[in-house]
Amino acid sequence: MSAWLQQALERSQANQDWLTPSRNRALAALQSTPWPSRRTEGWKYTSLSALEQLSAEAPAEQQVSEIPAIEGLDCLELVFLNGQLQSDLSTLQLPAGVRIDSMASLPPEQQVLATTQFANIKPERHLFGLVNDVLAQDIVFIQLDDGCHLPQPIRIVHQSTEGQQNHQRVLVRLGHKAKASLIEQFLGNESSVTTAFTELDLAEDAELDHYRLALQSGQALHFGGCHFCLHHRAQLNSTLIGYGSALSRTDIDIIHNGEHAHAKLNAIYLLAESEHFDLHSTIEHAKPNGTTEENVRGIVGDKANAVFNGRIHIHRDAQKTLAELNNRNLLLSRRGQINTKPELEIYADDVQCAHGATVAEIEEQALYYLRSRGISRSQALIMLNFGFIQELVNQMPNQQLAAWLQPQLRARFKEMEVQ
């Protein structure tokens, strides 16, 4: 066990609340879980050495900086600073059928439901998910009643500052035929440690557009996860955009727990020099007639390291499943590294499944063509890089969000340029 984790466990003893029984189960699991090494399959290409010697001190009080607005997009905004909720939930103008509560303000009659949701969808195998179970304090609960359609996206901004430890948790439940859009955004490039996990339960015929913008870079250490449970005919459209940092790891789980559920997952990771990004996704098809479409694209800069492990598991009873997984990568330098492992595990016999992965370099002929027409090398690289991911950006359901992201992605490509 690392010194950081030992200190974190000791500090967790101060968290005594109505979730204590759940926290204690997570604590027991942590204490019996070996600290990952390069011999641990799920961490083979990701070293935790950057974290192991850090202290796990509690966050000091900080002032939240101005949160950049998304132009043209009217959102219900929640802001976390170093794991502490800054927004006054009582001031939110919520339509009928929508509840947003923090752990401190959750009515007693809702605590029983929240207890059944907490750590119920997220698999226990995620080490930092267990850490988050134990240490998260300002937990947010979002609930939409049956038939409720929320027109405004909910935007949750997680901001980290220098030297801080942040542990954020969000639980989302969409009732029967409910519809919503959720944006999770992570900011802060200074040296910090973040664990941020979200559990989302989609009831029968519910629809969710989900965006996770893991934009922390620099010296930030980020460990997060999104965990979805889809019931009968539920519809999920999720987009992940991740920057690399000193160490970044994201785990995504989608469980098809009802027939005719559909999941679409698009992911983009963009790594500048010497950055690290690790994405693990697991799709569990437990019921028949489900569909999954997963497209992952990465661009990796000089001496950067990208890891992708995508697994689709078709259970024995999940007949007539349609599932596809593709991972395409672009290397900007031969000193970059990509470790990709798409997997299919199939126990049903009436399914249509496919998976694949590619790794390529910028075509010198295409670069020469653009430069011969008076376009600078820097601008030509931006155009080629953006062309590689443009298809996935265009598929985002919220085009205002996509338009807001485009100049930021262009700026990111300039940071990634190999000199």
Image (cartoon, rainbow, N blue to C red):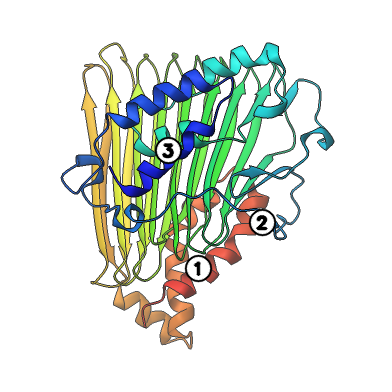
**Residue 249: where, in percent of width, then height?**
38, 48
- Spatial CA distance of label 2 from label 3 is 23 Å
Please say whether residue 123 is visible from this viewpoint.
no
* In this rendering, the label closer to the viewer, 1 or 2: 2
In the image, residue 14 sits, relative to residue 299, either above or below, namely above
Q: Secondary structure at mark 3?
A: helix
- Dividing the picture into quadrants, the one containing residue 31 is top left
Between 354 and 121, the one lying in front of the other is: 121
The reply, left or right, for residue 169 in relation to residue 7 is: right
Q: Quadrant of residue 358?
A: bottom left
Per the image, label 1 sits on a secondary structure element best described as helix
Place of residue 165 in the rendered image (x, y in percent of width and height, measured from the top left): 51, 50
Q: Is residue 77 left or right of residue 280?
A: right
Q: Earlier in the sequence, mark 1 or mark 2?
A: 2
Residue at x 42%, y 53% (from the top left corner): 55
Check disc 1 and report the residue beneath it. 412
Cα gap from disc 1 to disc 2, whole angstroms: 27 Å
Q: Say few, some or many: other residues with alpha carbon within 10 Å of mark 2 (under 14 / 14 to 19 / 20 or more).
A: few
The residue that label 2 is drawn on is 62
Q: Where, quadrant-wise, is the N terminus in this rendering?
A: top left
Q: Which mark is residue 10?
A: 3
